[in-house]
Image (tube, rainbow, N blue to C red):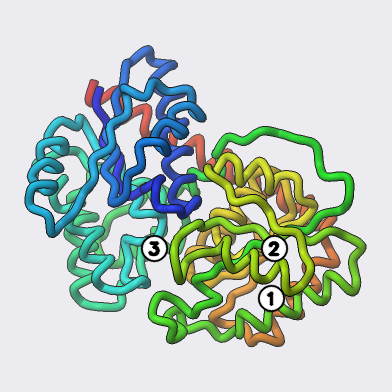
C-alpha cells in the first residue's frame, strides 16, 4: 500500500510537527507489520532535508527507500504538477495540518494554504483522513466555508479534543471521532533522572515576540516576558534545584526558541538544554526532569507522556481543549488570566508536584483509552480498502 502523509513537516525545525510525523509513522508501522502488509509512505512537505529523512527512518527502523518526500509549493507550477502525480499514487492520505493549522489563528493565508491541498486530495478522489488535531477557530467567513466543505468530503475526521468536535458538528453536522494527540505515543529512551532535582522551563520565542506580526497576534492577557522572569526568580529563590531552559523549535528569526533560551540562560545563569535534532531526543531529555513548565504544546505532551509533572501556559484553545478532554487541569490560560494571576497559579501548581504526578497518572489512562479508539478506527478502515 502507498500512504500519503500531509501537514507534518519534519524538516522545518518545529519538533512539535516532527513529533506528529514520528508518532504517526511509528503507529502505522506497527499496525501494518502486524497485518503483514508492505507499505510505502509519501510525505508531502514544504521543507525537506534528505539527512533528516534518514534520521527519521533510522529512529523508527524503517527502510529509507520506503519513504519518499515530495516538496510542495502552490506557486511553482512544476512542483504542483509533480505533487498531483504523487497524490494520485496514494491509496489514502492522512492529513495532520501541523496539529493546529487548519484554522485562521495564524492568519487567513495559512488557512487557505492548508485547505488547498486538502481540496486537491478530494478532487482526485483519494480517501482523506483528517488525523487527530485541533479545529478552528474559524474567525472569517471564508475559513468557515473551506472547513465545512473539507469536513463534509473527508472519509474520516478525528479530533483531539471535545471542543474541536463540537465546532466540527456546528459547522458541518459531522460527528468527529474523539481521540487525542498522537504525540502522546512518541517513543523515547527511558533514562535515569538527573542527580539533582531538575525543573525544565520550555520557552516559546513565538510568544516572547508576540506572534508572527509582533503585535500580540494571539491576544494574550499575560505579559509573557514578565511571567518568565517571575517564575524563574521564584524557583531560584524557593526551590533547591537546577533549572534547564528547553527549546522545542529550532527555526530562524521569530520562532527560534533555542537562540532565545541561550540568551536567557546567560542572563539568569541557568542551564541550557541541548539543541535537539529529533522529537525523540527532546522527549528523552525532558523525561529526566522532575517538573516541566512549558509554552509549546508538544513539549508539554513530551513531558506529560513520559510521566513528568507538567504545567502548561496556553496561548491558544488547543491546550485547554486537549488537557481538559483528559481531565488534566494543570494549565494556565494566557488569554484569560492576568499576568499576576498566571504567575500565582503557576506558583501554586509548583508547590503541589506530588499531587500533579498522581493526577497525571490518572489522565494518562484516559489518553491510552483514546489512542485505542484511534487505532481501531484505522484498523477498520485498512480492512475495508485492502
Please tell me whether mark 1 sits on a helix, a strand or a loop: helix
Which residue corresponds to the image point at 74% horizontal and 54% vertical from the top-left?
Answer: 309
Q: Between 372 and 276, which is closer to the camera in this rendering? A: 276
The percent position of residue 175, horizontal first and vertical second, equals: 33, 53
- Report crowding for label 2: few under 14, some 14 to 19, many 20 or more residues within 10 A (C-alpha): many
Please tell me whether mark 2 sits on a helix, a strand or a loop: strand
Query: Seen in the image, is 233 located left or right of residue 219?
Result: right
Quadrant of the image occupied by residue 334: bottom right
If you read the primary sequence from the N terminus, does the residue marked by circle 2 or circle 1 appear first? 2
Q: Which residue is mark 2?
A: 201
> On the rendered image, what quadrant is the C terminus found in?
top left
- Report if the CB atoms under discs 2 and 1 are less than 8 Å apart: yes
- Report if the CB atoms under discs 3 and 1 are less than 8 Å apart: no
The percent position of residue 296, horizontal first and vertical second, equals: 55, 62
Looking at the image, is 267 positioned above or below residue 38? Answer: below
> On the rendered image, what quadrant is the N terminus found in?
top left
Q: Between 231 and 220, which is closer to the camera in this rendering? A: 231
- Tag in front: 3 or 1: 1
Which residue corresponds to the image point at 77% horizontal and 64% vertical from the top-left?
Answer: 270
The percent position of residue 370, horizontal first and vertical second, equals: 52, 42
Looking at the image, is 129 positioned above or below residue 74? Answer: above
Amino acid at each position: 500500500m502507498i500512504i500519503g502523509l500531509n501537514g507534518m513537516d519534519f524538516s522545518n525545525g518545529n519538533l512539535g510537527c516532527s513529533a506528529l510525523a514520528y508518532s504517526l509513522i511509528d503507529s502505522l508501522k506497527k499496525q501494518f507489520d502486524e497485518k503483514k502488509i508492505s507499505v510505502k509512505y509519501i510525505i508531502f512537505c514544504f521543507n525537506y532535508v534528505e539527512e533528516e529523512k534518514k534520521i527519521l527512518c533510522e529512529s523508527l527502523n524503517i527502510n529509507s527507500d520506503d519513504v519518499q518526500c515530495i516538496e510542495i509549493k502552490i506557486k511553482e507550477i512544476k512542483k504542483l504538477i509533480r505533487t498531483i502525480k504523487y497524490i494520485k499514487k496514494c491509496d489514502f492520505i492522512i492529513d495532520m495540518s501541523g496539529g493546529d493549522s487548519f484554522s485562521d489563528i495564524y492568519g487567513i493565508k495559512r488557512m487557505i494554504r492548508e485547505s488547498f491541498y486538502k481540496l486537491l486530495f478530494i478532487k482526485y478522489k483519494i480517501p482523506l483522513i483528517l488525523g487527530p488535531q485541533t479545529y478552528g477557530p474559524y474567525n472569517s467567513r471564508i475559513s468557515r466555508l473551506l472547513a465545512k466543505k473539507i469536513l463534509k468530503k473527508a472519509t474520516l475526521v478525528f479530533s483531539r479534543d471535545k471542543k474541536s468536535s463540537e465546532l466540527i458538528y456546528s459547522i458541518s453536522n459531522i460527528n468527529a471521532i474523539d481521540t487525542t494527540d498522537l504525540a502522546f505515543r512518541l517513543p523515547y529512551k527511558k533514562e535515569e533522572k538527573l542527580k539533582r532535582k531538575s525543573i525544565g522551563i520550555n520557552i516559546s520565542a513565538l510568544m516572547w515576540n508576540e506572534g508572527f506580526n509582533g503585535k500580540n497576534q494571539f491576544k494574550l492577557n499575560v505579559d509573557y516576558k514578565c511571567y518568565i522572569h517571575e517564575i524563574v526568580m521564584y524557583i531560584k529563590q524557593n526551590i533547591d534545584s537546577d533549572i534547564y531552559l528547553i527549546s522545542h523549535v529550532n527555526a530562524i528569526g521569530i520562532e527560534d526558541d533555542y537562540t532565545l533560551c541561550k540568551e536567557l540562560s546567560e542572563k539568569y545563569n541557568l542551564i541550557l538544554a541541548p539543541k535537539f535534532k529529533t522529537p525523540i531526543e527532546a522527549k528523552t531529555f525532558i523525561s529526566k526532569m522532575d517538573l516541566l513548565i512549558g509554552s509549546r504544546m508538544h513539549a508539554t505532551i513530551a513531558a506529560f507522556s513520559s510521566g513528568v509533572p507538567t504545567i502548561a501556559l496556553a496561548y491558544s484553545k488547543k491546550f485547554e481543549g486537549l488537557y481538559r478532554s483528559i481531565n488534566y487541569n494543570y494549565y494556565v490560560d494566557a488569554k484569560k488570566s492576568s499576568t499576576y494571576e498566571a504567575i500565582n497559579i503557576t506558583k501554586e501548581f509548583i508547590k503541589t508536584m506530588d499531587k500533579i504526578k498522581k493526577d497525571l497518572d490518572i489522565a494518562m489512562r484516559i489518553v491510552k483509552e483514546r489512542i485505542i479508539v484511534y487505532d481501531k478506527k484505522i484498523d477498520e478502515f485498512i480492512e475495508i480498502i485492502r
